[in-house]
Image (cartoon, rainbow, N blue to C red):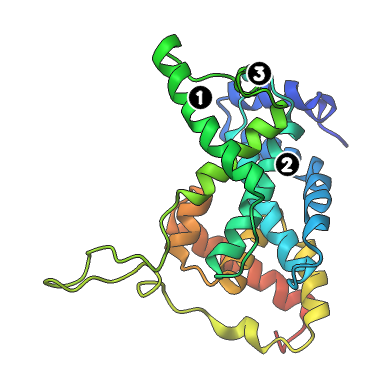
Amino acid sequence: MAEPWEKLSTTELFRALRASDDEHLKAKMREHLIKRHEGLVRHVVRDYTSSGESYEDLYGVGVLGLINAVDRFEPERGTRFATFAVPTIRGEIRRYFRDKTWSVRVPRRIQELSLKARDAMERFQQTRGRSPTYEELGRDLGVTEEQAIEAMEVSRQYDLPSIEQPTGEGDGEETVSAAERTGTLDMDIENIADRDALSRSLEKLPPRERAVIVLRYFGGLSQQQVGERLAISQMHVSRLQHRALERLRAMLGPKA
């Protein structure tokens, strides 16, 4: 039987989620919002079908972008969730390619718009004492609200440091990169011979568990890096990974 809050509009549900103090209820609302909008992920992933990467891998990464959009969306800013979520999902997929050192070219017009958007943000903050809404930013730049969001997402994604960049955390004068500090993987998943069966099983995992598996085993990130990406503790990542692997083993049989 559906919960009463499941009948709320997306904006109303986000407001209820932000206002609630019940962590269990908030988790259920959040999961419902993610599932309600997974169609946006399929819409975005279709644009990357010629990239050479499998649809299933990109779908998993896109779900991660959707999770980030749900967690960061601010309904009081007046933006429709879909308008905010699509550029966020697209940005996560671009970052996935970048982290794998694959090339997904950002159009020059978006690169230029991204630079203009950052300047416009700074001007607005200096004159108004607050950040502009995406609608205000788009109006300042002479573009649509969604284009303004995409410009800011590109800026956010491509300002992140490379995992190959030395961090200075080595002994003495030696420096190491984040990639060199990445933990080793549980390679059980590599023993799954039937990739199609694995892809179908991944689709059945809850969104957050699916995101953990994609980032760990297809993105090559450590549990700590996954936790930072999902804004959860490494221990929580470990629990989600263990639970997801148990589900996959049950679905795929003893060889998994």
State the quadrant of the N terminus. Answer: top right
Residue designated by label 2: 86
Residue designated by label 1: 120
Q: Secondary structure at mark 1?
A: helix
Q: Nearer the viewer, mark 2 or mark 1?
A: 1
What residue type is disc 2 on?
Val
Mark 3 vs 1, N-terminal side: 1
The residues tagged by marks 2 and 3 sit, at their Cα atoms, a distance apart of 19 Å
- The vertical placement of 178 against 233, above or below, is below
- Camera sees residue 67: no
Using the image as rendered, state which of residue 183 and residue 23 is in the foreground. Answer: 183
- Camera sees residue 210: yes
The residues tagged by marks 3 and 1 sit, at their Cα atoms, a distance apart of 11 Å
Mark 2 vs 3, N-terminal side: 2
Residue designated by label 3: 139
Residue 129 in the image, given as x and y percentages of width and height: 41, 12
